[in-house]
Amino acid sequence: GNFEDTGPDRDWGDRNEALLALQRLFDEAARIEENDDEAMFDAEAWRALRLPLQQCLRDPRSHLVREACGLLAKIAHACNDERGLPKQWVSRDGGRPCLRDATPALFELLGSGNKLNGRVADDCLVSVIDSTRSKHLVGAVFEHASVKRAGKAPFVRE
């Protein structure tokens, strides 16, 4: 499926189905045993996912936001081991480029005033940080939080 938004009349059902298919793909990737094969996901995969995933996170429909956040959590879980280190056979970079690029959209959701989307984004951020233990991702989170706090946006949990 294609989950890229190609206009205001784009059928959101197509994007939802594509998100669900990608979630199933990463569920399968999480179950793959360690091997010496090439990584399943590389920088090209993350580039292909970046913009459409950000569009889904910024969609006004909470259902799409929930599925996009679910996909991010599954990417983080599938691509990293229990210590938060990349599973080299799934993705050498642990999916960090994709997860890092989604961070600003997740923070926008936290500050959007939509309580449902804010709660979903908060759960997603916690899950991603817990799964990755990435200094780059945590740095992006703190950088964005610092910029928003300077603007007195009251959405970062104390």
Image: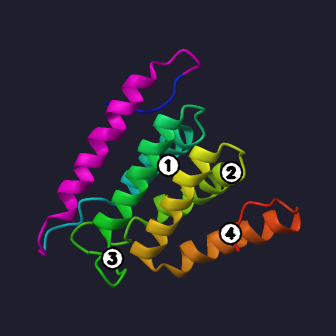
Marks 1/3: CA–CA distance: 19 Å
Give the magenta range: 7-35
Closest to the camera, between mark 2 and mark 3, is 2
Q: Secondary structure at mark 1?
A: helix
Within 10 angstroms of label 4, few (less than 14), some, or many (20 or more) residues? few
**How far is disc 4 from disc 1 in space, using C-alphas?**
26 Å
How dense is the environment of label 2, judged by Cα within 10 Å: few (below 14), some, or many (20 and up)? some
Disc 4 or 1, which lies upstream in sequence?
1
The N terminus - image quarter: top left
Task: Report if residue 31 lies within the magenta region.
Answer: yes
Mark 1 surroundings: few (<14), some (14-19) or many (≥20) residues within 10 A: some
Query: How far apart are the two marked residues, 1 and 2, measured between alpha carbons?
Result: 16 Å
Q: At x 33% / y 35%, what residue is drawn?
A: 18
Residue 15 rendering spot, x and y as whole percentages: 41, 30
Viewer-nearest of labels 2 and 4? 4
Q: CA distance from mark 2 to mark 4?
A: 14 Å
Mark sitting on residue 108: 2
Q: Are marks 2 and 4 in contact (CB under 8 Å)?
A: no
Badge 3 is on which residue?
A: 86
| CB-based contact (under 8 Å), mark 4 and mark 1 | no
| Secondary structure at numbered mark 3 | loop
Element type where label 4 sits in the image:
loop
Quadrant housing the C terminus: bottom right
Where 81 sits versus 108, above or below? below
Query: Mark 4 — residue?
Result: 157
Kindly report which numbered mark, 4 or 1, lies closer to the viewer in this rendering: 4
Residue at numbered disc 1? 50
Q: Quadrant of residue 87?
A: bottom left
- The total number of labels drawn is 4
Q: Is residue 38 left or right of residue 121?
A: left
| Circle nearer the viewer, 1 or 2 | 2
- Left or right, 69 with reference to 1: right
